[in-house]
Image (cartoon, helix red, strand yellow):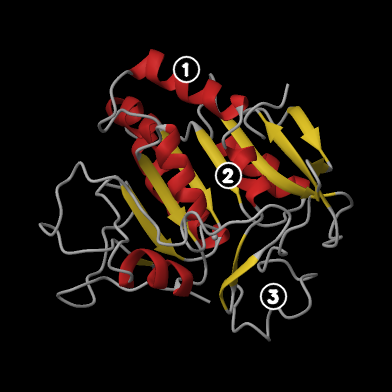
Amino acid sequence: QSHLDQPTHLSNDFVRRREFLSRISSTVSIVMLPSVPVNALDEETPFHSAAYGQEEYTNSIIASRDTNISPKEVYDTISSEYLKEALDAALKERGGRGAAGPRALDVGAGAGVSTEVLYKLGYHKIDALDWSGSAWQRYVVDDPTGYCPPGVTFYELDDERYLDQWRMNYYEGVNNFKQQQQAGGLLFDVIVFNFAVNESKAKLFARELLDKSHGRLLAPINTMNDYWLKQTYKVMDSDGNVLWSAADVGAWSVQFQPDVTQETCSGVWCAPFNGFQKKK
């Protein structure tokens, strides 16, 4: 289970509510969305989104009003050797796939395709978040083939609000010396952003949330600050150092939806058109 607040159950049947090629060398309530009743499926059943398999090369597919299934190049990139290196290091240092197993943060999880890619890679402890839970609801919760195991937790909130809650839990832990080692379990081996961000945000998440010895962050970063029309894929370590970058992945020129939390976000993907309310 996540170290953040426990899920709020909204009914007896469900709890409500988005991309390295494999070979490339206002207070807001938090709603967390497990997909099924506790005893509905065996704990070992793997995560599955009904949107998985629908992705196409160079083409985005609409998953909801607020979410696209990204081009397949995105998910090939998530499956890269850099992220696999972080997985191998986590298994070597901590071993096992239980509570101490590899941990991933899937930011902008949308319909859960990126979450499934991470799960299949071996990250079975995943915090997945998106400010809009409609696509997750459709493909993971409501679809009869969808399933979310106990190790995967969905948070219906944006990255800034998630970070606030993560900080509260992490620093409360490290204030007690005896809990420092346990609090270290809140750090992530891999962080994946599935929307465009400024470099400052990517470095903030890398430096604060990544495992210090081997953590990796993958994000599409604006080529210029607050310029949302073109991004460069970058992989960073826990110091924010860039280990790899690419403006094009295969035939696809890297471009994502903008970061809705930013004041410079404009157009149909941004407030007020999409209903998002920025943290005050």
Separation (CA) of disc 1 from disc 3: 37 Å
Q: Quadrant of residue 192?
A: top right
| Side (left or right) of 208 relative to 47 | right
Query: In this orientation, which residue lies closer to the viewer: 52 or 209?
Result: 52
Pinpoint residue 156: horizontal percent, then vertical percent: 44, 67
| Side (left or right) of 241 relative to 47 | right
Q: Which residue is mark 1?
A: 89
Helix, strand or loop for disc 1: helix
Separation (CA) of disc 2 from disc 3: 20 Å
Q: Measured along the vertical axis of the image, is residue 264 above or below residue 54? A: below
Helix, strand or loop for disc 2: strand
Q: Measured along the vertical axis of the image, is residue 119 above or below residue 64? A: above
Residue 19 showing in the rendered view: no
Separation (CA) of disc 1 from disc 2: 17 Å
The numbered mark at residue 192 is 2
> In percent of the image, x 47 and y 55: which residue is there?
52
Q: Measured along the vertical axis of the image, is residue 65 above or below residue 154? A: below
Query: In this orientation, which residue lies closer to the viewer: 149 or 172?
Result: 149
For disc 3, the neighbor class at 10 Å (few under 14, some 14 to 19, many from 20) is some
> In percent of the image, x 65 and y 43: which residue is there?
204
> In percent of the image, x 59 and y 84: which residue is there?
275
Pinpoint residue 75: horizontal percent, then vertical percent: 59, 45
Residue type for callout 2: Val
Residue type for callout 1: Ala
Helix, strand or loop for disc 3: loop
Residue type for callout 3: Trp
For disc 2, the neighbor class at 10 Å (few under 14, some 14 to 19, many from 20) is many
